[in-house]
Image (spheres, rainbow, N blue to C red):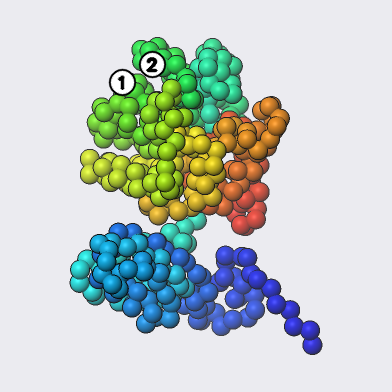
Amino acid sequence: MQFIVKTIRNNDIKNELIKIGFDSAYIDYASLKHNFLTLKIQNLPPHLSTIIKQTALSKGCDAGIHRDVLLNKIEHSDLILSGTIKQLKEIAKNLSDQPFGLKNVAKSIEDEINLYFKKSNPKIMGILNITKDSFSDGGKYFELNDAIIQAERLVQEGADIIDIGAESTRPNAIPVDIDFEIEKLTPVVKELKKQNIKISIDTRNSKTAKKMIELGVDYINDVSGLNYDNKMVDVIKNSDVNYVLCHSKGTPDTMDDMAQYKNVADEIYEELYKKSLFLLEEGIKKERIIIDVGFGFAKNVEQNFELLKRIKEFNSLGFKNLAGVSRKRFIKSLTNENNLETLDELTMLASFYLLEQNVDIIRVHNVKKTKTALDFYRAIYSQKPCL
């Protein structure tokens, strides 16, 4: 008889076990033995690193630590912990009974296991720029009637949320007067609210955010990540609006010079962790906070692709997340063609990848193509396509 050996690339191990006739009474527990997860725990003192490593070894898996931990030559070490879900659960159980704060480590391991099984219900955020100088469609929807028609078109094509911006934040963009920003946004928001359309406002100005919240918008998308206007957090915490916390550095005229990182994914993760913790301490509920790694904001081409490759790691922050790669310069770097159709095709491919990484909100210019990617994604994973 010819034996056939192949690698299973399907993450639904439970279903694979069912297909081969595995005992259904044991399947939930057994499937945990076939799901593998690697975790990184940072800034552990040597004695905690040693305890976790020894606990891991006792459960049949391993933990990688700094070579000088056993020699007690360093103050802290990161730790790479790998094992099956079953093994990691047992490690967490053992650590929960240990002193030195290891109960918190155990809780974090359990949280990561829960995130492993997360199934997102992704939404599409359609971009509506009512500016004269946005990088791909500046001036196209500057007039009120054109803006309303475009918003309605985006909704018809499948947008769940319309993100409206009256100030371009592309590199080297010129700031607009805040009163002018409010003046441009107000009639568009009022009209779309009549149609019960979910609205996000792309602004870094607290005065603008406050006025738009009074008009009933659902999201404030702050591309400055609290860096531009120190009154923004007060506006957000005194409302019930959702807040998109975007990572960025500098302002549009300085951000390109600030793409300086030793490890872009780890540094941005740490910055977003600290800022999200600050928001929680200010009393803003977790379910209202949305994380955005800020593709294109103070990141060069290589850094953007590194973030894209590691975007799933940001799920560990424990918040919903948003990604906006649509027509960005790093996407454009893949082609010599300078037309929107090509950029939108590349964006659609990136959007499908982001959906696979459990991103909750995809922010795009071309909603129709992204809707196609979302329907394809749902078809693959046996979910009902959007109608």
Q: Residue at x 57, y 52 (%)?
A: 356
**Residue 341 place in picture, x, y as percent:** 69, 30
Mark 2 → mark 1, Cα distance in angstroms: 8 Å
Q: Are marks 2 and 1 in contact (CB under 8 Å)?
A: yes
Disc 1 marks a residue whose amino acid type is: Lys
Residue 73 lies in quadrant: bottom left
Residue with the mark numbered 2: 182
Instruction: State the mark number for residue 327.
Output: none
Residue 335 lies in quadrant: top right
Picture layout, residue 179 above or below residue 111 = above
Q: Residue at x 71, y 30 (%)?
A: 337
User: Are there few (<14), some (14-19), or many (20+) residues within 10 Å of tag 2?
Assistant: some
**Residue 106 place in picture, x, y as percent:** 31, 68
Residue with the mark numbered 1: 207
**Image quarter hosting the C terminus:** top right
Disc 2 marks a residue whose amino acid type is: Ile
Residue 320 visible = no
Among the two numbered marks 2 and 1 on one chain, the one whose residue lies closer to the N terminus = 2
Tell which of 157 and 339 is nearer to you.
339
**Residue 284 place in picture, x, y as percent:** 27, 41
User: Are there few (<14), some (14-19), or many (20+) residues within 10 Å of tag 1?
Assistant: some
